[in-house]
Amino acid sequence: MTHLKILEQRLLWLSHWMIHHANHVRPKVDGIKIGGHQASSASMVSILTALYFSALRPEDRVAVKPHASPVFHAIQYLMGLQTRAKMENFRGLQGVQSYPSRTKDSDDVDFSTGSVGLGVAITAFASVVQDYIAAKRWGVGLPLGRMVALVGDAELDEGNVYEALQEGWKNDLRNCWWIIDYNRQSLDGIVREGLFGRIEKIFGAFGWEVIRVKYGALQRAAFAEPGGSALRDWIDRCPNQDYAALTFMGGATWRKRLTDDLGDQGEVSALIERRSDAELAALMENLGGNCVETMAEVFASVDHDRPTCFLAYTIKGWGTPIAGHKDNHGGLMNPTQFAAWQKHMGVAEGQEWEPFATVVDVADLKAFLAQVPFFARGRRRHHDARVAVPQIGFDTEREISTQAAFGKILDDLSKGDSALAARILTTSPDVTGTTNLGPWVNRRKLFARKPQADAFIEHRIPSTAKWEFTPEGQHVELGIAEMNLFLLLAAAGLSHSLFGKRLIPIGTVYDPFVCRGLDALNYACYQDARFMIVGTPSGVTLAPEGGAHQSIGTPLIGMAQDGLAAFEPAFADELAVIMGWAFDYLQRDGEGDPDERTWLRDETGGSVYLRLTTNPIEQPGKRQDDAFRQGAIDGAYWLRPPGPNCEVVIAYQGAIAPEAIKAAGTLSEARRDIGVLAVTSADRLNAGWTAAQRARSRGNAAALSHVERLLHGLPPHCTLVTVIDGHPATLAWLGGVQGHRTVSLGVEHFGQTGTIGDLYRHFGIDAATIVTRAKGLTHGAR
């Protein structure tokens, strides 16, 4: 235990010095506060010390609460896994990050955190994914680790935490720890009295064990003294605000308050008087979560795999001059306070960055650290070989929607025995059947750790859904919570790194409800998780259901979201080509040098978003040419190449294709050389264009993007008409590529009920409107 106490003090110092250095020592270059959350770090020091240096094993995974990142980085620095240069540049360019990041930090971050609540919930889904892998033939022997979240008590205000609790219960969650830093202070105030009593009941209702860690070793020893029970009762009754204020004011104030409330009781008075002001303050601040001895004992006492919530009572700012102050969430020790605290901590000037500056027996401590189980195997980032992608073919039908084609492609894969099919994990937030995953699930079944029979099959009740739960199943059923969908995709999309076993996660969701899970989608991409998200039906194609089920801005989300390649194919053969490419793209991990043909960084890989529709459209017949296949991947190809005197080009994206084709036919009766540009990915076209412009600005005059080559031969007087069943800004930028006059058609307002034809006309994205707008522009040009 001596080693843990030494480490606790070292981590308290290093984390706070790093923050102080960034705010008060490092030269200022602008007037922006750097910050760093000293108080929120201090409350977690004892917990993190006990966890990392006593409880964890190499197979365990941890999500550190955002505001405790300085302590996490200090742990890595102490273990030689982080550099001093990066520590000195905390919250600076190329320095350690404000919040732990898998992609931005060089130390061993398991789960990125930052958007509060999401780092908590992903641990539950990572545990489900771990069980999913362990149940498969190719996952036998996977060591089962605990998925651990270090949680700020204010994070429990986040609704996604409770959505995850429900999903965990449904999926028989195990091997999951949530450790709550119950300091009872948030940014705007003090946590309400008795709140956790209610939260505790919620955890219990979903099968969690709740362990309250309220008293430290000093307090428990004091409670055993004569009069100690009265002191314990007083602590239990003391309001949160009073306890925080008394902590800030210190030992003399503690003495007066305790004497006023408990004095003249003989034994209690003697208990108080036996201690100096400093000793009394140390006793009263020795809550369970600020006692490394207590936390280590509690962690060691858990001998089961049930989900467990530790309610660790702490003091915000523990061990520092700002402990307990209600403004300390974003507050910092000023230089005068810090200088006095440095003297108190015994750190000599010039020794601030020394990992073992105050340690008497450095060799002994280093010998202890060399035996710490969690760090014994070195860096814990795993790898798995890329899975070969079979030919993704598709027999073109006369009419089919892209949503139906997606279902058929997956069904074809489900019939085979490819390695890719074995690694696919599908999931959907209660829209499995209506997003065409049904055939896949019928063949590949649903996942559960224990088999569950389908009662409809047992009783021979006819149903198109033959859904059986089994450990071999490859579909994870989710309730209606899109945040959970993206968190599960994030966890599954990191499986190759977390568990050394690659998954190909595919999630389906109603396209307008992508927005419901947008925070978790961004969080998943920020971690570089690899998955395919299928948004369907998109646009206004669920016409009779009105605006609530019609998406407008999702193409812009696809363009704006980093780490996500967004596609909106119109035809089934485009979708087949794109999915074949995407299954490989999900697995890439190159260095990021751009492809000078497109100027896209495809070798880095990433996730993929497919925006599909329910609107069946006539297919173009068999197409085998390379220009079509490569163009579908790169973002666009000429469905109808323009002639040398082209006056109008109609550029469309998605299932609006028939309207664009029909309009081109009408226009060609009076105008020559009409071109039709089939855009499959405005996202990739735009990304390549902007990347090529950057390359030219850096001196590479020959840099040309795919879209620049496509539009290069158009005459200056040519007019572009862009059309999409989505926001018109998705394609409006095409006019800027070569400076052509452009009109952009799309949907800008909430949808109406009606037929698809009604709505196309209502929003002005039908063939007749396209023709009218094109004629008006070309007429005006003359």
Image (spheres, rainbow, N blue to C red):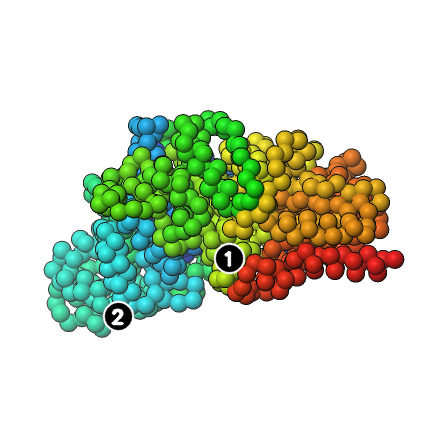
Q: Which image quarter is the C terminus in?
A: bottom right
- Residue 506 figure quarter: top left
Q: Measuring 63% from the left and 31% from the top, which residue is drawn there? A: 624
* Residue 93 coordinates in the image, percent (x, y): 59, 45
Q: Mark 1 points at which residue?
A: 542
674 left or right, relative to 34: right
Q: Nearer the viewer, residue 201 or 656?
A: 656
Whether residue 477 can be seen here: yes
Q: Measuring 69% from the left and 41% from the top, which residue is drawn there? A: 639
State how many labels appear. 2
Reply above or below: 585 against 230. above
The secondary element bearing badge 1 is classed as loop
* Residue 497 coordinates in the image, percent (x, y): 43, 34
Disc 2 or 1, which lies upstream in sequence? 2
Residue type at mark 2: give it.
Answer: Arg
- Residue 49 figure quarter: top left
Say the numbered circle drawn on residue 257.
2
Q: Which of 121 and 240 is in front in this view?
A: 121
Label 2–label 1 contact, CB within 8 A: no
